Amino acid sequence: MLGIQQLLVGAIPNTLNIWYNGLPEFAGWFLNYEQPIIIIDENNSRIDKIIRYLIRLGYDNVCGYLSGGFKVWFEGSGDFESLPTWSVHDLLPNMGKNSLFLLDVRKENDWIKEHINGSHNIYIGLLKDNLDKIPKNKHIVVSCDSGYKASIGASILQMNGYKNVTNVLGSMKAWKKAGYPVTNGNKLNNIA
C-alpha cells in the first residue's frame, strides 16, 4: 500500500499563531498595546485564561474572540491560508536544494550548540525586524526546538507576503530522534 499525505494547517489571513502555553513568553514580542486583539482558540475552552494572560501583560485591547474557533470560520466559507507541514523525513531529502531556505528560529546559543547543517538562524523574537534577510523567491522551511516557535515564524512570514512557507513538525527534537546529523559551533549562517 502506498500512502502519500501532506498535512496542511490553515490560518485566517493576517493572524499571528501563538500556541497557548507560549502566550506568556511570546505575546510581548509581537503584540502591541494599540492594535485590537481578537482571540481564536480551537474550542474556546481557554478564552478566560488567555484574556487573563494578556491583561497581566498589559494588553487591555482584547476586543473579543471568534466563537467556535477556526472550524466555524472555514465552515462558514471564511478566507484562509494553508500552511504545509513536513516531518523531518520530508525535510531530509530536500536539504541542499537551491530552492530551499531552512530557517531555524531558536535562540542563537541553542543554534550554535547544535543545528541542522545548512540552516540559517534568526531568533523568533527578531524575525519581524530581519525579514530582509529571508529570500521571498525560495521555499522557506521553518524549524525550531519542537515546531511551536516555527509555527509563529511561519505565520509572521505569511503575514509579510511569503507564499511558499512550510513548518517542520517536531523540528530539532524529531530530527535528532530520527538520528539525522547535527552540526555545532558554526556561526556562518546566523543572519540576525
Image: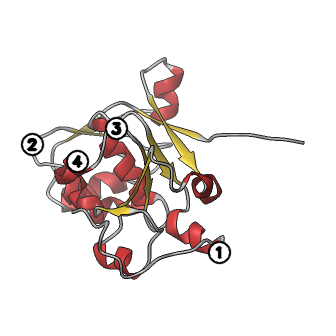
Between the C-alphas of marks 4 and 3, the distance is: 11 Å
Q: Is residue 45 visible?
A: yes
Q: Amino acid at mark 1?
A: Gly
- Mark 1 or mark 4, which is nearer the start of the sequence? 4
- Secondary structure under tag 3 reads helix
Between the C-alphas of marks 4 and 1, the distance is: 31 Å
Image coordinates for residue 60, horizontal then vertical, percent: 15, 49
Indicate the quadrant where residue 185 lies. Answer: bottom left
- Mark 4 or mark 2, which is nearer the start of the sequence? 2
Q: Amino acid at mark 3?
A: Gln
Mark seen at residue 131: 4
User: Considering depth in this image, is 51 or 104 the residue closer to the camera?
Assistant: 104
- Residue at screen point 42% across, 21% down: 79
- Mark 1 or mark 2, which is nearer the start of the sequence? 2
Image coordinates for residue 84, horizontal then vertical, percent: 53, 40
Q: Amino acid at mark 2?
A: Glu
Q: List the residue tagged with mark 2.
A: 34
